[in-house]
Amino acid sequence: MINLNQNTEYTTKPILRLGFRPFFFASGVIAVLAMLMWMVFYPSLILINNANPIDWHAHEMIFAYASAVSIGFLLTASKNWTGVQTIYNKPLLALLTVWIAGRFLPFIANEYLIYQAIVDTSFLILSTLAVAWPIIKAKNWNNVSIVAKLLLLAAAHVVFYLGLLGMISKGVYIGIYLGFYLIISLLFMMSRRLLPFFIERGLGLQTELKNSKLLDLASLFLFLAFMIVEVFFQSLVSTTLAGLLFVIHAIRMVNWYHPKIWTKSLLWSIYLAYGLLTLGFALHVISYFFNMMPNIATHSFAFGMALMTLSMMARVSLGHTGRNVFQPPKQLHVMFGLLTLAFVSRVLLVSAFPQHYANLIFISQLLWISAFSWFVVIYTPMFFKARVDGQFG
């Protein structure tokens, strides 16, 4: 048990009591603001401190939004895994401040790019230390692989900035896609642990959903190979690996399926998100053999990432503010539905009607903004108020 004295409980603002609070709030806000800014930057030729608008957009979705969600989740989860208190109060505020600074620095004069790189990358380095500390202190070696993924994510961010500074050829591309696939690998790891458990608990099942150690190992090593080949070589090998990964994850989805998940917003959203990630592998294979719009597979992965992180934030925020995860707000169906429609517009309809590309992108952007705005409206009061059960956290 974690014992915090009464003075600490009363003097620490609720927003700074546990990692998920400030970082989920910040993630929701940046998801809205970054997409609004993307709508402005997309048709322009504006350079944002050496980065073209497309690279800036990708960077913010990966290293601002997805990274903040991941750190918020892991600071919260590692406390549960280890029984060791993770950073809170002023240290947590300091970490959030570094993240916020990274969002503003790209719009300062170009000669300060090196300072932007140092500050923005230091967020991931400091976050990795904050997540690693309780795991190492408690000798919770089962979760060391998560720390390793965060270290690699920080390294990918360094490569991105070295490319932006002209020090590594293709560094921007390598950094973005390494970061992108590392986030996806982290989501696959966490969903393997949590998705079957959520379904069993959420539906009150008396038996465990089927899992396979062979599929687990195959998924891990084949995705590692896919990531390396896809980022550095891009050949038929990565297409073959994508096909194998599609089969593996499709089998998992069949094993975990239950028709009643569609009645529970916090179940169907994360299950569908896993499906969008799985679909990304299939679209990767199809696009090798057929002429498709650019980045269709990438955006299937991206929307799978977005829907899964949104679903996880929605669930974790309820549970860790003392609310009942089995009776979530009814508006969540709408929130997740809006983001699903954004995927339909950006991926499926764009593929079917490429002549309407610009209009469909605009519709998808509006739906994305609506979904995350809904999240901010519903959950902001929870982040800034104490737990309903009076506990610290």
Image (tube, helix red, strand yellow):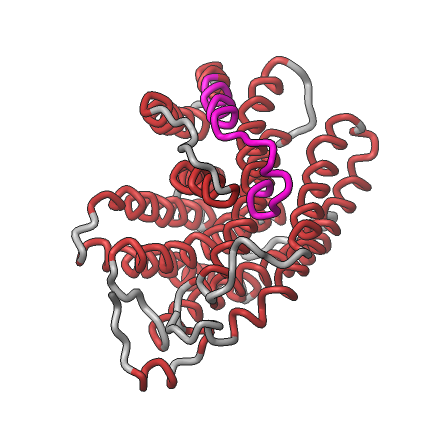
Give the camera-side residue of 150 and 18: 18
Give the camera-side residue of 88 and 207: 207
Where is residue 106 shown, x and y percent of the image? 53, 61
Q: Quadrant of the N terminus?
A: bottom left
Q: Residue at x 71, y 48 (%)?
A: 338
Where is residue 359 shown, x and y percent of the image? 82, 41
Where is residue 384 shown, x and y percent of the image? 52, 74
* Residue 180 visible, this orientation: yes
Question: Left or right: 372 with respect to 58?
Answer: right
* Residue 372, placed above or below residue 300: below
Question: Left or right: 114 with respect to 276?
Answer: left
Res 128 → quadrant? bottom left
The residue segment tinted magenta is: 244-269
* Residue 251, placed above or below residue 337: above
Res 92 → quadrant? bottom left
Question: Left or right: 183 with respect to 91?
Answer: right
Q: Residue at x 18, y 56 (%)?
A: 138
261 drawn magenta? yes
* Residue 24, placed above or below residue 17: above
